[in-house]
Image (spheres, rainbow, N blue to C red):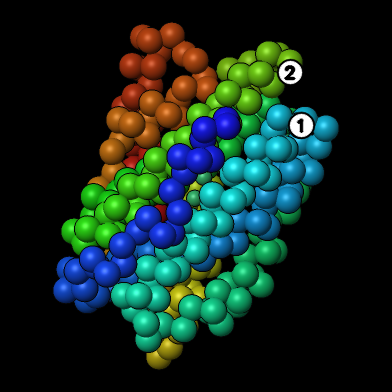
Amino acid sequence: MAGYEAAHWTIDDLDFSRIELDRIRDDDTLFYLACSASFIESGSDLYTHNLVDFFAGDEEVTAWLRDHWEHEELQHGRALRAYVNHVWPEFDWEPAFRNFLTEYATYCKVDLLAPTRGLEMSARCVVETGTATYYRALAKAASEPVFVDLCTRIATDEVNHYKHFYKFFRRYRGEERLGRLRVLGTVARRTWELKSEDADCALRHIARGRHPAQADDRAWQRGLSSRVNRTVSRNLNPGMTLKMLMRPLELPAPVQTALQVPIELFMQRVFLR
Ligand SMILES: [Fe+2]
Ligand SMILES: [Fe+2]
């Protein structure tokens, strides 16, 4: 772990002077995707504290959460915010974020965590799979080089978070003697929850700042949300996502192959909702 922090990137590594404005500024969908990601990442400390409490007494886990994970998630938020400010300076980020946070805080309760530590680790694997997938899709959807660079860096971090949670999951699975079926239940439930309240809540608050006249129109909201989801789902890499989602189940290869198609369909539904 010692060299890990030294190798990690900072906002100064991003060269905002290289941004090619004409490749992104008029893309309203990418504005919403980048901005909602900046909101959710910037709200990370709300649930870091929940997780740290949940794993109290496990020094290896809590130290990593506090010293690496939380720090990196918040940096994702800051970097995305800086990017949004640079490309869309007319958007007033702070007040929209404050309003978002007030509502978002009501979703982040400790009782939303999985019933055991091991199952929560499998759920964290799902969440990190979701974020890694999201940023890879964004990097693919965009052509502006600084944005592609930023999303690629974040995606790499998310995969790295996944690896840590997976390592912790394996330790707890042994200690708790978790069966595949219980893990599958948690993985399926979290996959279903991936694309739901958080993103819609962020989009709503961004829209109030960006498109105040339409923001409270339900039909317009649905249109915005499906535009945003379509951009992500068109650029998904289902193979990689599936591999990450199924890894905690450690299924024999033939079972994994048999499950591939139904899970792929399930995932498409999750991202297309
Ligand atoms: Fe992140
Ligand atoms: Fe992450």
Q: Is mark 2 within 8 Å of ligand 2?
A: no
Q: Which residue is mark 1?
A: 59
As shown in the figure, which amino acid type bears the numbered disc 2?
Glu
Q: Is residue 132 above or below residue 106?
A: above
Question: Sequence-wise, which precedes: disc 2 or disc 1?
Answer: 1
Q: Is residue 45 above or below residue 100?
A: above
The C terminus: image quadrant? bottom left
Looking at the picture, tell me which residue is in the foreground, 103 or 40.
40
Position of residue 7 in the picture relative to residue 136 (left or right): right
Query: Tag 1, which secondary structure?
Result: helix
Q: Residue 246 at x, y = what percent?
A: 45, 25
Closest to the camera, between mark 2 and mark 1, is 1
Residue 20: quarter of image: bottom left
Looking at the picture, tell me which residue is in the foreground, 268 or 72.
72
Q: Which residue is mark 2?
A: 176
Q: Residue 239 at x, y = what percent?
A: 30, 30
Q: Give the alpha-carbon distance from disc 2 to disc 1, as whole Å.
A: 18 Å
- Residue for point 31% across, 62% down: 15
Q: Is mark 1 within 8 Å of ligand 2?
A: no
Query: Tag 2, which secondary structure?
Result: helix
Q: Residues within 10 Å of mark 1 (few under 14, many from 20)?
A: few
Position of residue 88 in the picture relative to residue 188 (left or right): left
The N terminus: image quadrant? top right
As shown in the figure, which amino acid type bears the numbered disc 1?
Glu
Residue 28 in view here? yes
Q: Is residue 83 above or below residue 175?
A: below
Q: Residue furthest bottom?
A: 213
Q: Residue 238 at x, y = what percent?
A: 31, 35
Residue 192 in view here? no
